[in-house]
Image: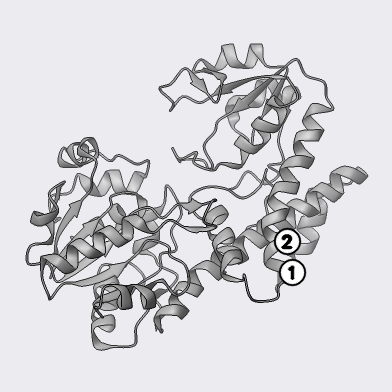
Amino acid sequence: MKIAVFGLGYVGLSNAIMLSQHNTVVGCDVSQPRVDLLANKESPIKDDLVEEYLLRDDLDLTFTTDFAAAIKDADFAIVAVPTNYDVESNFFDTSAVDSVIGQVLAANDVTIIVIKSTVPVGYVTQARNRFASDRILFSPEFLREGRALYDNLHPSRIIVGERSERARLFADLLLQPVLEEEVPVLLTDADEAEAIKLFANTYLAMRVAFFNELDSYALSRGLDTRQIIEGVGLDPRIGSHYNNPSFGYGGYCLPKDTKQLLANYSEVPQNLIRAIVDANRTRKDYLADQIISMQPRKVGIFRLVMKAGSDNFRQSSIQGIMKRVKAKGIEVIVYEPVMEEDEFFGSRVIRDLPTFKAEADVIVANRLDADLADVAEKVFTRDLFGAD
C-alpha cells in the first residue's frame, strides 16, 4: 500500500513510522523546519522510540511539504492535524481536517481518508454529507505523549469507525507491525467510534479528578493521602493505577476532549460530565490557595512539561497554578530547560537549576525529580507515587 500521512505530530509521526515498516509512506506537514529535521532522521518531538526508529534503514518513509506529491497514488490518507478546542464556538476547530479532506477528494477519486485527529461526535457523518463523499472514515488513537510509537506498537485496541471490508483492511494495516500477540479489533459505526474516543478520555479525566479531590480532602483534614489511596486501590474493581495526585489533568487530549464531550451533551441531561470539567478548575484554585497561604516572596515553577520524558507543556496543569499565584502579585520564576524564550507569560525563565533553587522560596513541582532532593523542604508537590 501507499499511505500519505498529513500532520507529523505525535499521532501522525508515530503512525507514519509504524506503517512504513510494511508500506510506502509519505509524511506531509506544513512546517518546512519539521520536515527538514525528519529528512535528516531527527525527531521534532520528544519520544525515545521515535528517535530510535528514525535511524533505521528498513523504513519506506519520506517526508515532504508538497501535498500533491504526498497524495499521488495513495491508497489511504491519514489525517492527523490539530483540532484545538475553540472556546468561542464551544466546539473543536476542525478547519484543518476539513482542509485536508477537501484537498484529498479533489486530488483523486480513489484514496480513502482515515481521520486520526479527535473530532466531535457526528463529524464524519456531517463531513460525508458536506463533501458528498463516502471516502471518509474515523479511527481513534489512544496514545501517550512521549510514548506514542510504543503505544502504536503495543495497542490496547484498534478501532475503525466503519463496518466494511475497507475498514477491516485498514485495521489489518495497523495490526501488521504490532508487537503484541492478541489485540482486540472493533469495527463500529462512525458516530460510535468518535464517542469512544471522547468517553474514554473523559473517564480518565474523571479518575484524575477523583483522586485529586480525595487528596484535597486529605490535605484539608491533615490526613495521609497515600495511605487512603493505597487502601482504596486494593479493591480490584478500582485498582492501583492512574491514581497519583497532581495539579489537575492537562496536555493534548483530556482538557479539550472533556469540554468537547460536554458540548455534545448540550441537549442531553447530565451532571457528571460538567462536574469533571469543573473539578479541574476547582483543584487548581485549592492548590494555588495552599501555596499562597505560605506567603512566599518568590515562587519557582519546576518544569512546565506535563510528564517525565516529555517536551510538551501545552495546557499543562501547572500553568493554571502559576497564573493564580501571579494574580496575587507574587513573583513567579520558571525553570524549563527546553524553552528557548527568556520569558513565559511575563515570568522569567531560568535554565540554570542551582540559580533557580537558590532564588525560589517555594518550588512548585507537578512531578517530583531527583534534582530537587537537596531542597526538599522548599518543594510543594502532590506527587506521591513518582508516576505520571
Q: CA distance from mark 2 to mark 1?
A: 6 Å
Left or right: 266 in relation to 55: right
Query: Which quadrant of the rendered structure holds the N terminus?
Result: bottom left
Image quarter of residue 124: bottom left
Which secondary structure lies at badge 2? helix
Residue 50 rendering spot, x and y as whole percentages: 30, 48
Q: Which residue is mark 2?
A: 275
- Residue under label 1: 271
Coordinates of residue 185 in the picture (x, y in percent): 38, 80
Mark 2 in CB contact with mark 1 (< 8 angstroms) = yes
| Vertical side of 195 occupied by 321: above or below | above
Which quarter of the picture shows residue 346?
A: top right
Q: Position of residue 49 (x, y in %)?
A: 33, 49
Identify the residue at horizontal 60%, vertical 35% (top origin): 319
Given residues 19 and 52, the one toward you in this image is: 19
Horizontal relation, residue 277 to residue 146: left or right: right
Q: Is residue 385 above or below residue 355?
A: below
Give the amino acid at mark 2: Ala
- Marker count (numbered): 2
Q: Position of residue 344 (x, y in %)?
A: 52, 24
Q: Is residue 27 above or below residue 238?
A: above
Q: Residue at x 22, y 64 (%)?
A: 102
In the picture as drawn, the residue positioned furthest to the bottom comes out as 164
Visible residue check, residue 36: yes
Q: Is residue 294 left or right of residue 102?
A: right
Amino acid on which disc 1 is placed? Asn
* Mark 1 neighbour class, 10 Å CA radius: few under 14, some 14 to 19, many 20 or more: few
Give the left or right position of residue 35, taking residue 256 as reference: left
Q: Residue at x 75, y 48 (%)?
A: 282
Identify the secondary structure beneath mark 1: loop
